[in-house]
Image (spheres, rainbow, N blue to C red):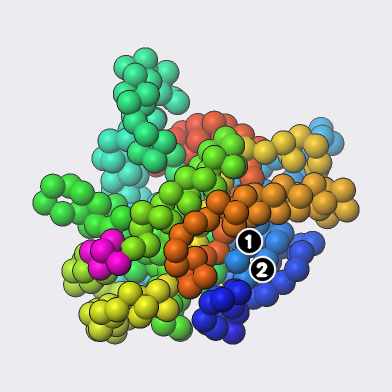
Amino acid sequence: MAAMQGKSMRPVIMTGRFCLGAFLMESRRFDKKNIIVSKVNEDDLNSFLVDMDIGDDGQPYYPINELASCIINTIPEYVFAQYENPEIPQTDTVEKLREAARSIYKIKNFDIMRRWYLEHDEAARAEIEKLSENQRGEFGELLLHLILRDFKGTIPLISKVYFKDSAGVPAHGFDAVHISPDEKILWLGESKFYNDGKIGVRKLLEDLAEHFTRDFLNDQFAIIKKNLENNSIPQRDEWIKTLSSCSKLQEKISLINIPMLCTYSHDIYQRFSDFTKDDAIAYHETNIRELKQYFDVKNEHPLKTKLNIILLLFPVRDKKELVIKLHEKLWHMQSM
């Protein structure tokens, strides 16, 4: 059982110090080429890097295209929360991909970001300036979905995109709602994607304060349970019963893991090309330890000693570069 100070003992993740290589899963669902490597793997802190290579010219190679591809590969499952569906005929696969991609762009804020990044639409830029950072569709939720599936072995319980109420409001307020298939653990995740890691961490703390309260969790449990009735997940009836039986805040908290992902731009990729070298390891660890300390110091949630929080830190070379590549691939997917 993994536990954090002051928290109940529950299986969360493998305990580790500083991992020099990738955290090896028996089988990754989306990142099959192991583009993303796990570096720090602790009970309340995980970090990831994009694995570098060398190009044909002998220079360091940052696999932006491969990274974007494995993120985009999550979209059908992210949209429909169907982690496996053998009933979909092979002939329908392409149409399913189109439908999933179009569902993403039906989210107004994603389409606004596409218009700006790909078309340099000034009207879209004006609309973006009216949005808060939390309202901008910039793929952080897809990254969270990928990391939970490939590194935590979770499965999606319901989809934020697919299930909406009559007013078109998303089915729940979390960026991810997953479960552990063999354990009674509900993963309620949040994700931020910023140029500045410290800002992203601060925004995660704002979500923590807003979302982990008695009233909010009561509402979310009811909404998730309602939408589960439309889902074909094998554990559906069991989870409906579990969610229905959790009446106390303490019962809800004991059921939940809270993965909080901050993806951010960082210069480690300009400084190093081999992340197994001591100086690269030290540089990365200094960065993520500083962000973790900032998170802990600024975390003033009254229930923080009872919440099972896992801070996930994922520096990438450049946020804008990745967002543009993701929009290019998503636009192509919906146009197939």
Q: Please report the residue visible at 41 percent of the width from the left and 52 percent of the height from the top.
A: 207
Residue located beneath label 2 in the image: 42
Amino acid bearing label 2: Glu
Q: Which residues are magenta?
A: 214-219
Instruction: Mark yes or no: residue 230 visible.
Output: no
The residue tagged with tag 2: helix, strand or loop? loop
Q: Please report the residue visible at 54 percent of the width from the left and 31 percent of the height from the top.
A: 320
Residue located beneath label 1 in the image: 46
Q: Nearer the viewer, residue 333 or 161?
A: 161
Residue 140 in the image: state x and y as whole percent: 47, 47
Quadrant placement of the C terminus: top left
Amino acid bearing label 1: Asn
**Does the segment drawn in magenta span residue 165?**
no
Residue 166 in the image: state x and y as whole percent: 11, 51
Name the main secondary structure of what is drawn in magenta. Answer: helix
Residue 28 in the image: state x and y as whole percent: 57, 65
Left or right, 18 with respect to 322, comes to: right
**Does the segment drawn in magenta span residue 218?**
yes
